[in-house]
Image (cartoon, grey):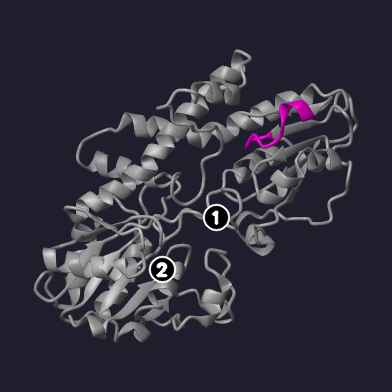
Amino acid sequence: MNFSDFRIGVVGLGYVGLNLAVQLSKHFSVVGCDLNETLVKQLKDGVDSTKEVDLEDLRNTSLVLTSRFDDLKNCNFFIVAVPTPATNDGAPDLSYVESATKSIAEILKKGDIVVYESTVYPGVTEDFCVPILESKGLAHLVDFNVGYSPERVNPGDRHHTLTNVVKIVSGDNSDSLETISWVYEKIVTAGVYRAKTIKVAEAAKALENTQRDVNIALINELSIFFNKVGIDTRDVIEAAGSKYNFMKFYPGLVGGHCIGVDPYYIISKAKKVGLNVHILENAREVNENYSIYVFREMLKKMLKQESCIGAARKMRVLVLGLTFKENVPDIRNSKVFDIIRLMDEFSIEYEVLDPQADAEMVLAHYGVSINPQVEDNSFDAVLLAVSHQEYVEAGWSLAKKYLRSDDGSVFDLKGILSVEGACSYNLWRP
């Protein structure tokens, strides 16, 4: 392939694909495709709902945006950056990858290269995607090549970005590897790491997120123990952190589209080859159930409040933060909604606020209404679920503003409030 004749097609314009397409368009002719017509229209209007791309870059980009796959027919280098969620029972959902691959197969030409960025289990690129790409008559390694370069996006992180984090790249032979490396080196100043095989690259990405899930599960389970014996978990972590090789992980809800999903891909693949990865399975169970533990602790605290005992009204809770992590609008697989569902089951009244989340999306996906007109001093408890910058800066003043009594409960899941500032309020943190 003549490098001067590169025409790149990026499939999927979410958290991963959009920024990738914008950065690549500074060096190549790029077409970005997403089947979500509303999203494409927003992007054409210069609106990025993910808040991951600099608005000036988006408005000044030469990137061609489309919702029609046919507009990619002249591209010769494809990058697939579509979601890879899990089903409700924890099975890998490759439907987006399958659909994108089928569409590419329709327009694939001799000499083309297809690179996957979506997180998958080892073998998906070569054993699942390649046969689909070959379904229209072209032969792998003869007519076209494939590669895998896992995304390493950390939503909301302005310090570790696409351009300054080392990019893993892999290809099905030495020539494709060099071509793929050359493309990514154009935008990644930190450089690329050439994995020995595509399967190694796939496994490396799965390991990155699975390791984090296991580490958080460890501290989540220990936080339950520490709470039981009357020890503050964060005090323990700070003390242990005085040793040079201790890794600090903090307890909390594990949601989102990566850490809370990717381990299921390894678990599923392991079962297919006759193995049980018990540590991963146990970690997933601990983290999936942590929201139940948090709710139980909330309930116990509120039932002991003098202002709630014998009150001829329902308990009221203000939920601050709905997104799966701080400073992002992403509500996918947010475990805050698990706590909200439990409040519904126990007939606890609540209001929710979130400066980042899109109110229409929250209502459409979860049936929960964000009410920006929340009354002051009208809640028995405040659930500080997400550490958005606005909440960190407000500190205790935010919680005190909404509590109706001096013995109100504050459930600080992210540990952003000082213990010293609690005064007469009931502060609980995992």
Front position in the image: 193 or 263: 193
Callout 1 crowding tier (Cα within 10 Å): few <14, some 14–19, many ≥20: some
Image quadrant where residue 317 sits? top right
Report the amino acid beneath label 1. Answer: Gly
What's the amino acid at mark 2? Leu
Q: Is residue 225 above or below residue 128?
A: above
Q: Say left or right for 23 vs 391.
A: left
Residue under pointer 1: 156
Instruction: Tell me: residue 351, above or below residue 64.
Output: above
Q: Residue at x 42, y 26 (%)?
A: 244
Q: Distance of mark 2 from mark 1, alpha carbons?
A: 15 Å
Which residue corresponds to mark 2?
20
Q: Are marks 2 and 1 in contact (CB under 8 Å)?
A: no
Q: Nearer the viewer, residue 132 or 420?
A: 420
Image coords of residue 159 (percent x, y)? 50, 54
Q: Which residues are magenta?
A: 412-421
| Quarter of the C terminus within the rendering | top right
Q: Earlier in the sequence, mark 2 or mark 1?
A: 2
Left or right: 361, with 18 as reference point: right
Residue 420 lies in the magenta-colored region: yes
